[in-house]
Image (cartoon, rainbow, N blue to C red):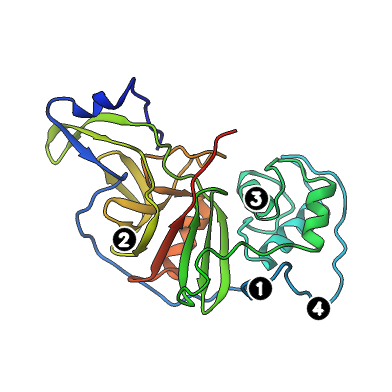
């Protein structure tokens, strides 16, 4: 969901407006949680690279979005091994794989790009681990890095999932919509607040909130949730929620249970 900019904060005081922080409904829905069963590489605090059993040799073939072939398949399999979610290893470099590439590049200090070239291939051979935001955190927790726009899910002390995100834009908004049978006006700051939270309720599939549609939302701070979105750009763009690529939002409910700590840190600096 995008946020419509307004001339100034005075717009938030529009008569009849409900001032909010977040992007979803706070009405409890059915919940479910299942244990995580995925493959990933253990992450140790302070580690600089992911240990490998044998040297890794990347194809080193420059790839652009839309590319097909064995080099793309290698890329997809390698990203999956490292805890990213590029989608099926089908040899097709599309949008799902691109989101995983962006996450990997950001973790490794590479400017996000759709082109896979020398620096990205080298990093895939000797990758860095995500920076641990909460060194004494629970073994199972989610860490949201607003500065890098990534989320890391740790399960049992291991990084099970690393993904690209798009958080709150920080641009004040006011939206008029029909909600609970009548036309209402909702306003907010479009911020994803930093702090320590826990996952609360969730619902499956598309959920209609007062600010739009959320896919498989998992709420952790009032009306703020992790949720799938059709648009997850390289910059903060939501009303406050943490947008995820759709394929990540499909698997997250099985991995992230209720009452799991969520730590949100940092701030995004626009170029």
Mark 2 neighbour class, 10 Å CA radius: few under 14, some 14 to 19, many 20 or more: many
| In this rendering, the label closer to the viewer, 3 or 2 | 3
Are the two marked residues, 1 and 4, in contact with CB atoms closer than 8 angstroms? no
Q: Residue at x 49, y 75 (%)?
A: 136
Q: Residue at x 41, y 64 (%)?
A: 262
Q: Earlier in the sequence, mark 2 or mark 4?
A: 4
| In this rendering, the label closer to the viewer, 2 or 4 | 4
Left/right of residue 212 with respect to residue 176 in the rendered view: right
Are the two marked residues, 1 and 2, in contact with CB atoms closer than 8 angstroms? no
Disc 3/disc 2 C-alpha distance (Å): 28 Å
| In this rendering, the label closer to the viewer, 1 or 3 | 3
Disc 1/disc 2 C-alpha distance (Å): 28 Å
Determine which residue is flagged by label 2: 202
| Element on which disc 1 rests | loop
Q: Earlier in the sequence, mark 3 or mark 2?
A: 3
Determine which residue is flagged by label 3: 106
Front position in the image: 74 or 199: 199
Disc 2/disc 4 C-alpha distance (Å): 39 Å
Q: Is residue 72 above or below residue 13?
A: below
Disc 1/disc 3 C-alpha distance (Å): 18 Å
Image quarter of residue 64:
top right
Q: Earlier in the sequence, mark 1 or mark 4?
A: 1
Image location (x, y in percent) of residue 195? 38, 58
| In this rendering, the label closer to the viewer, 1 or 2 | 1
Left/right of residue 265 with respect to residue 123 in the rendered view: left
């Amino acid at each position: 969901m995008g946020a419509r900019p307004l001339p100034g904060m005075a717009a938030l005081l529009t008569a009849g407006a409900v001032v909010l922080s977040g992007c979803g409904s706070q009405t409890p829905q059915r919940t479910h949680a299942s244990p995580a069963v995925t493959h990933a590489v253990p992450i140790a605090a302070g580690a600089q690279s992911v240990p490998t059993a044998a040297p890794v040799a990347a194809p080193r073939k420059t790839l652009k979005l839309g590319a097909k072939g064995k080099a793309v398949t290698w890329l997809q399999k390698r990203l999956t091994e490292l805890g990213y979610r590029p989608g099926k290893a089908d040899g097709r470099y599309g949008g799902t794989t691109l989101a995983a590439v962006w996450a990997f590049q950001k973790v490794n200090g590479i400017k996000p790009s759709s082109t896979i070239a020398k620096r990205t291939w080298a990093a895939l051979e000797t990758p860095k681990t995500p920076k641990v935001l909460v060194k004494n955190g629970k073994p199972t927790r989610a860490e949201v890095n607003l500065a890098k726009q990534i989320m890391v899910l740790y399960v049992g002390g291991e990084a099970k999932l690393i993904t690209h995100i798009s958080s709150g834009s920080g641009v004040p908004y006011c939206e008029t919509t029909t909600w609970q049978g009548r036309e209402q006006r909702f306003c907010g700051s479009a911020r994803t607040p930093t702090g320590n939270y826990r996952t609360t309720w969730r619902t499956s599939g598309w959920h209609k909130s007062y600010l739009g549609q959320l896919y498989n939302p998992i709420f952790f701070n009032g009306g703020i949730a992790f949720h799938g979105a059709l648009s997850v750009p390289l910059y903060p763009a939501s009303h406050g929620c943490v947008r995820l690529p759709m394929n990540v939002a499909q698997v997250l409910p099985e991995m992230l249970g209720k009452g799991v700590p969520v730590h949100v840190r940092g701030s995004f600096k626009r170029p």
